Amino acid sequence: HVWRNQLTLWEDVILKSPHKPRTFINLAVAYDKNNRPMESIYFLSKAIGINKNDYGSYMTRGTIYYKLGQQTQALKDFNQALAINPNYFLTYLRRALLYKKQNKFKEALADLTKSINLQPDFQYSYTNRGLLWMELGRTDRALKDFQHALKIAPHDFEALVDRGGLYYSLGQYELAIKDLTHAQEVDPTNVMVYKNKANCFLKINKINEALKDLQTVLHLNPTDIEARTMYQNATLLKQ
């Protein structure tokens, strides 16, 4: 019974070792994975009560607060984590996402750059900074960051989709199609990629190719109204 799942396992460990913060942290992670954030916050708070210098507990609790939309608590925990350990790249990345949500772009850029400086081979810092550059209209810098992310991880789905979207916005439809095709190979079930690629094909008047991608979408999700409308419109263009 104890070994049935991670929750029962760590609940049992806590009963036997109630003063070890690591057991509370592991149980909190298990609760988070089971979509039970309040229990996760409770046990992370217990871990912090035992060891107030564990920056990882603050960062993890801050991340859960962030997902719950509790930005004030999340920022407080991220700041505390960085006060304890100012050299952990992931905390800067997560605080940057919070700053971006608050439209504090200067602070978000500073944190993303700090994250990259601390861990130069973590592609997600580059993709997130690239997305922020796009929002600021700096497509040149965005492209540079997406290129760097894909140099680190050539098959990263998000980076491929993001760079494809950037190419689309620049009117470079063939390059966008190339990235989106690669993204399809990574995840052949993501309908949005097929629709985005169909839009690229329509821009360069390749109607048959667009119809093929839209047919795939409708095969994957027959109730996709947007794809069905696009398919009907593309069919009219072909006539």
Image (cartoon, grey):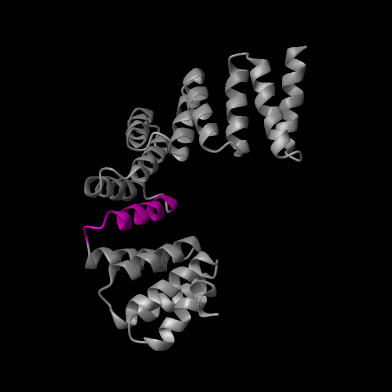
Q: Is residue 231 above or below residue 52?
A: above
Q: Residue at x 39, y 43 (%)?
A: 128
Q: Residue at x 40, y 50 (%)?
A: 100
Tell me if residue 67 is in the magenta stretch.
no
What stretch of residues is rendered in magenta? 86-101
Horizontal arrangement in the rendering, residue 228 relative to residue 41 (left or right)? right
The image quarter in which residue 153 lies: top left
The image quarter in which residue 148 lies: top left
| Residue at the top extreme, as displayed | 239
x%, y% of residue 25?
38, 73
x%, y% of residue 92?
30, 55
Q: Residue at x 35, y 31 (%)?
A: 147
| Nearer to us in this view, 28 or 200 | 28
The quarter of the picture where the N terminus appears is bottom right
Tell me if residue 100 is in the magenta stretch.
yes
The image quarter in which residue 200 lies: top right
Q: Residue at x 22, y 49 (%)?
A: 118
How many numbered marks have been drawn onto this rendered protein structure?
0
Horizontal arrangement in the rendering, residue 169 relative to residue 96 (left or right)? right
Secondary structure mostly seen in magenta is helix
x%, y% of residue 222?
76, 38
Horizontal arrangement in the rendering, residue 211 relative to residue 104 (left or right)? right
The quarter of the picture where the C terminus appears is top right
| Nearer to us in this view, 103 or 238 | 238
